[in-house]
Image: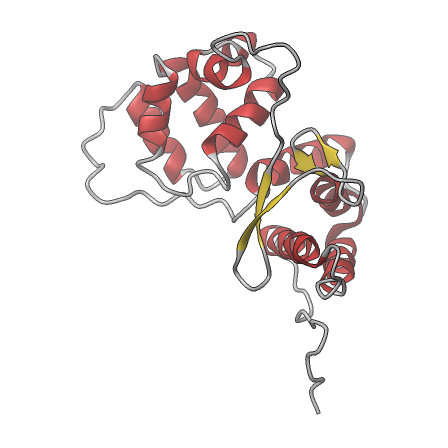
Amino acid sequence: MPASPLRRSTLRTTIVVAFLGPLLAACTPPGQEAAPATGCAATVREASQAAEPDRQVDLLDVALLSCASYDRFRGEMVKYPGIVGYDLDTYLAVRCVRADDENIRTSPACAAVVAPPTTPPPNTVAEVVFVGDTLDGRRIEIRPSELIPFEGDTPAVVQQTVDIAVESGCDGVQAQRDLWAGRIDDPTIGDEASVFAQHAQNVLDYIQCVSTPLTLPGDEPDT
């Protein structure tokens, strides 16, 4: 049955937050049980234990308002490695723009990431770099190019895979994975194709799809 517009929007937001990199993990490291019951530290700690991605995002929004500075927010976040699925500044750059609450968008942590502390010199252009994992476990940098257009600071293919998950479900994402896995030997785009295939596999796992095993170029078929 087709998903409602509200469900599609919620799913898209959830997948974007969780998959520009490894899967979201919410593990609490030992030795953190003594955090105060309220405030910045306690809210981040509660977010690290949240089972639902939407609940975690809501709690981190509260933490953005509770933490008095970017350094304080980062200091609490680094206690829980993997609390979000990718680099903290990337998470803030996305969340601080998309949050409906203006107080969140203008919080100290958001202001430190979204608005630079000083005015850059004229004609200064920040380099856009996306870091992703390949199928064989390497971490590579991807930059915008004629072959790999970006949407903002993310490769368009990554956003496309998220949209496919919302619109077409498991079959669509698996087809996307297999499409890019078939190009990993391409000398012009092989590493990037491997990242896009791995990202699609991450999305399949996250939305709990039962997918067929990935077959890579050169793999011997089962007999």
At x 36% / y 26%, what residue is drawn? 74
Q: Left or right of 120: which side holds 76?
A: left
Residue 209 higher or lower than 128, as above or below: below
Residue 156 higher or lower than 134, as above or below: above
Exactly how many numbered labels are in the figure?
Answer: 0
Q: Where is residue 203 in the image (x, y as percent from the top left)?
A: 63, 51
User: Where's the C terminus, which quadrant?
Assistant: bottom right
Q: Where is residue 100 in the image (x, y as percent from the top left)?
A: 61, 15
Q: Residue furthest bottom?
A: 223
Q: Nearer the viewer, residue 196 or 77?
A: 196
Q: Which colour scheme is used?
A: secondary structure
Q: Nearer the viewer, residue 200 or 13?
A: 200
At x 72% / y 30%, what residue is drawn? 6
Q: Which of 125 and 80 is in front in this view?
A: 125
Q: Left or right of 68: which side holds 190?
A: right
Residue 12 higher or lower than 140, as above or below: above
Asked where in the image residue 77 lies, by quadrant, the reply is top left
Q: Left or right of 209: which side holds 61?
A: left
Q: Position of residue 119 (x, y in %)?
A: 54, 7
At x 54% / y 17%, what residue is drawn? 114
Q: Nearer the viewer, residue 92 or 192?
A: 192
Q: Where is residue 211 in the image (x, y as percent from the top left)?
A: 68, 65
Residue 32 higher or lower than 168, as above or below: above
